[in-house]
């Protein structure tokens, strides 16, 4: 009975979000100039800012920043169960031109399944945006599960695994023409204390075929091409993002094996309707592994992208293989004119496949709705609370600080 009551509340939330989408999204007011409205964020809501600062919503008048958002919270996801976390975001300008925000995103958490993790993502612009530095550093102690190398896997294929993980990915870019950057980087992925349950089946066979030891190291140089004309990567309002990376892992650099990987990440943001504050977003995320054998835990896997944002509605690691194709569309709309509350409706499709398996590469769908709460109006940073669902009864919540893509 209690579970039924919870689901009834969830369905009511979904209905309310869809209704507000139809009212505020499709029939949105056509004034794109948000400065007409007295913008509010969560700080204003609790009266922690002065009246003067709450009425001034133009971040350019606030100098170069930094603009901070900090959120201690409790949450629940399919991957972690109940979890306590602290998420902090800082956005700031690095020069007086104020063309693009630089960002720092910090995430620390501990879950009921005795998982704990620390992630630090940075995105800096220097020298009037001619130089662009991006880094992704994280540490995980992570008992979890995997399901084998097929898009046709089911929850019955679940295999429990445990490991510790350290990642350090860095790229330094140089702008060659406006908003187009070329970069050279280094990627390190190191897993140790890898253990799996002894449940016999296809998943264990797949796991052992790619993981021969209790530790793995992938170390490689990356060549990168980036086009990005968004003004704020944490909450894009319009523009394009296109990223191509070639990664070559080699034993000379400390990698266990020689293998290569290509990654393609393309995003597009459109004001829709044109003179509204609502945004229609498109995302294509793809990875191809070749030229050798990658460790199982370094294979492309749904939910294990840079910010762990792919595949809302599915537990991370639900689909894994040498190759991944992912598509997502999201509509972001304003609920309150002061910008404090917003909503999203999203849908996604995923396919993973192996070169050596003769199987049809079907796509599995996912989708859901979400609520946005303005945490910092000057950097336009939102707290994301999403409920996603997929096939086979897969469903769950996602929390994030800053938009999912």
Image: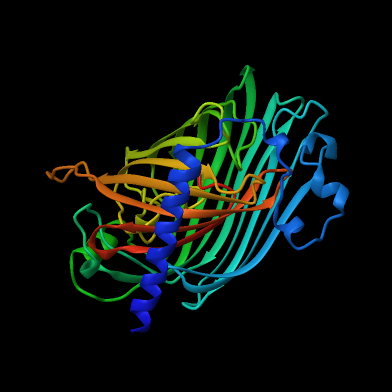
Query: Measuring 37% from the left and 38% from the top, which residue is drawn there?
Result: 286
Q: Nearer the viewer, residue 138 or 373?
A: 373
Q: Nearer the viewer, residue 376 or 127?
A: 376
150 versus 181 height, above or below: below
Residue 39 located left or right of residue 48: left
Question: Quarter-wise, where is residue 170 in the image?
Answer: top right
Across and down, in percent, residue 48 comes to 81, 60
95 versus 110 height, above or below: above
Outermost residue, bottom side: 1
Across and down, in percent, residue 44 comes to 76, 56
| Whether residue 304 can be seen here | no
180 versus 139 height, above or below: above
> How did the renderer colour the structure?
rainbow
Q: Say which quadrant the N terminus sits in.
A: bottom left
Across and down, in percent, residue 388 comes to 38, 57
74 versus 338 height, above or below: below
Outermost residue, top side: 177
Question: Quarter-wise, where is residue 292 in the image?
Answer: top left
């Amino acid at each position: 009975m209690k579970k039924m009551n919870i689901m009834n509340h969830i369905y009511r939330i979904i209905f309310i979000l869809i209704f507000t989408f139809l009212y505020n999204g499709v029939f949105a007011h056509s004034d794109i100039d948000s400065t007409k409205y007295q913008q509010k964020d969560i700080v204003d809501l609790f009266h922690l800012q002065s009246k003067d600062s709450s009425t001034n919503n133009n971040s350019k008048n606030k100098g170069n920043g930094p603009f901070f958002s900090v959120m201690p919270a409790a949450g629940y996801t399919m991957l972690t169960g109940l979890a306590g976390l602290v998420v902090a975001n800082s956005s700031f300008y690095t020069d007086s031109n104020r063309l693009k925000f630089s960002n720092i995103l910090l995430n620390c958490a501990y879950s009921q399944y005795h998982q704990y993790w620390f992630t630090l993502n940075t995105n800096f612009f220097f020298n009037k945006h001619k130089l662009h530095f991006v880094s992704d550093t994280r540490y995980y102690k992570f008992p979890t599960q995997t399901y084998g190398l097929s898009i046709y896997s089911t929850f019955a294929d679940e295999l429990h695994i445990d490991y510790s993980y350290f990642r350090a990915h860095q790229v330094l870019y140089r702008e060659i023409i406006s908003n187009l950057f070329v970069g050279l980087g280094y990627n390190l992925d190191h897993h140790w204390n890898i253990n799996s349950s002894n449940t016999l089946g296809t998943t264990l066979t797949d796991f052992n075929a790619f993981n021969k030891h209790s530790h793995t190291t992938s170390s490689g140089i990356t060549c990168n091409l980036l086009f990005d004309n968004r003004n704020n990567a944490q909450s894009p309002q319009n523009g394009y993002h296109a990223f191509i990376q070639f990664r070559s892992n080699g034993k000379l650099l400390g990698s266990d094996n020689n293998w290569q990987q290509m990654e393609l990440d393309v995003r597009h943001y459109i004001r829709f309707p044109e003179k509204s504050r609502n945004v229609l977003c498109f995302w294509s995320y793809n990875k191809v592994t070749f030229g050798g054998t990658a460790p199982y835990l370094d294979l492309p896997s749904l939910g294990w992208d840079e910010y762990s944002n792919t595949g809302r509605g599915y537990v991370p690691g639900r689909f894994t293989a040498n190759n991944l194709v992912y598509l997502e569309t999201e509509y972001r709309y304003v609920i309150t004119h002061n910008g404090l509350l917003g909503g999203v409706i999203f849908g996604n499709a995923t396919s993973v496949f192996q070169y050596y398996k003769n199987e049809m590469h079907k796509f599995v769908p996912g989708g859901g709705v979400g609520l946005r709460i303005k945490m910092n109006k000057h950097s336009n940073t939102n707290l994301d609370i999403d409920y996603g669902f997929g096939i086979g009864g897969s469903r769950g919540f996602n929390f994030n600080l800053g938009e999912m893509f």
